[in-house]
Amino acid sequence: MTDISHAGTTGRGIDRSRAIYWGVAALTTILVFGPITPIIFQAFLDKPLYDDTAVLTLGNFGRLFSEPGMGGVFFNTLYFGALTMVVAQVFGAVMAVLVGRTNLPGRKWLGEIFIWPLFVSNLVIAFGWFTMYGPSGFMTLAAKTYLGGAPWNLYSVTGMGVVAGLSQAPLTYLMCLAAVTKADPLLEDAARSTGAGPFRALFSVTIPMIRPAIIYSAVLNFVVGIEMLAIPLLFGGPSGIQTVTTFLYNAGINAAVRPEYGIVGAAAVILLIVVAVLVWLQGFLMKGAGRFVTVRGKASRPSTLDLGAWRWPAFLFVFTFAFLTIISIFGGIFMRSAVSFLTPLIPFWKVLTTANFEHVLGSANYVRSIVNSVLVATIGAAIGTFFILVIALVARRSDFRHSRALEYIALFPRSLPGIIAGLGFFYAVIWLPGADVIRGTIVVLILAFMIRYIPVGFGAIAPALAQVGEELDRGARISGADWWTTVTRIIVPILKPALFSCYALLFIHFFKEYVTAAFLYQPGSEIIGTTMLQLVAQGDNGPVSALATIQVVITAAFVILARRVMGAKIYG
């Protein structure tokens, strides 16, 4: 029998498993904290970090807060984030309860519609809102023509916050849906037996029981709000309204004209600290989630609550919400891409054209951005899945003494906003010796995206790994196999469904990402998101809508393929 004490040891006496443990831990630490380090240094330097004469200083923070209008920037950021959270929570939780727990007509296909926005970037969603509800948008012109005016204004902090909240409601919906379908129906039945109506039972019993999901998604939506770029840039820019993300974006883009490295670094550090605290708060608030558990060893089968005469009014409410905030947004993008101009005063079929797609597909730069996006998503998701798999195995299925620390490091990018990740990699490739070789290539995009979305992939693999009994490991180890042989031959094959899900999630996130790439791309490494950013700034709406449509179509095709062929579980 093989001597277990020497299994997996090379001829030079090096334990292969230990080498993998330490190698993975070192690589993960470098990749996660490498981009953050230069930002922190820059915040405390009086000159660019690549300047050998730079000295330490705290003056950047003083300059930041004394910068004209900076107080308003921070206020706008917090107000925008808070409003995003409130709107998302109210509508998302209500939709989750109505779709997930009642006999609402059409709840199956309505539930599918609600998760559509999660598959595309905020930039696409923002452009859809601009197309339909902007000053010259289809819905705005229709309201002015037939109602005498439009009761909305997207070019204000409040308008931006409402748009962002409605755009984030699907995230709240998805998180609350999982909780509401597992709540004990006996509690609702008890409320009904005392005379409570269906809505009273829902809002008095069911919604309080899904409080952990509401709390978790509330903090997450607040974080998403304060780190969001697309909506503040598209609607705040023309009105002179800035948030921290648009300040960093504009300062970074204009760095060659007016370098303010110190102020940018200080603002980035403050945003990073705020997001990190919020992520910690999210975990802290969830510690008491066990108080709300209603499904235990002898669980009741989930049932639907009969709305009675309220079924169709509830359906009208839910469908109206879905139509105005999701269907019309995607429909507006598709229609705008196929017409020379979009207006309710002229039937769209009279202005149909293929010019927008011809313009996009006839331009080498635009075609390259599409190809690069597909390459980054396809190759990056594969590399990311393998890397995250090894991290999860070392962190959750090894005897590595620093496994818990490795997991904390791997999950740290949850508190890393995309704008900070992009800025950090931008500084890193300039600052670190030898890193300049990947500057302006899709390699740096893949690295940046992979690091940012490690927590997403980890969340797909870790639960599946926890369901694999440890007796399988022990049996293989007793027979003489080392750790690496055990996990690759026994554990990994069992995890194939989770790996497909991880790959699918990473592909979707990589394909729709744009914020992280804003500082990293150069001519030749453009992706769809960065090209759309440029076109939006130029006001060239036809090509923007064509690119957005192409992105949506490719994403939809991949989601269908991933679900039906790969069997991947995407967003529940």
Image (cartoon, helix red, strand yellow):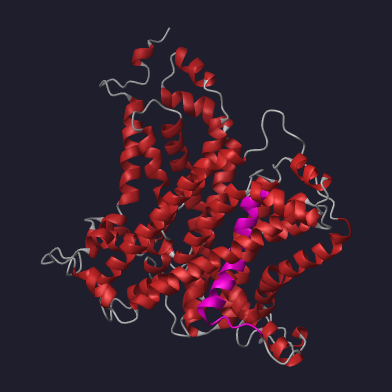
Q: Compared to 138, does 572 lie above or below? A: above
Depth order, front residue of 460/203: 203
Q: Compared to 253, does 503 lie above or below? A: above
The residue shown at (32%, 60%) is: 424
Side of 123 relative to 68 (left or right): right
The residue shown at (61%, 51%) is: 175
Q: Position of residue 108 (x, y in %)?
A: 78, 54
Side of 483 relative to 571 (left or right): left
Side of 152 relative to 229 (left or right): right
Residue 445 in sight in this render: yes
Residue 416 in sight in this render: no
Q: Is-magenta flag for residue 166?
A: yes
Task: Determine the residue located farthest toward the left in the rendered image.
Answer: 53
The residue shown at (81%, 63%) is: 315
Task: Determine the residue located farthest toward the right in the rendered image.
Answer: 309
Residue stretch rendered in magenta on the structure: 151-178
Depth order, front residue of 163/454: 163
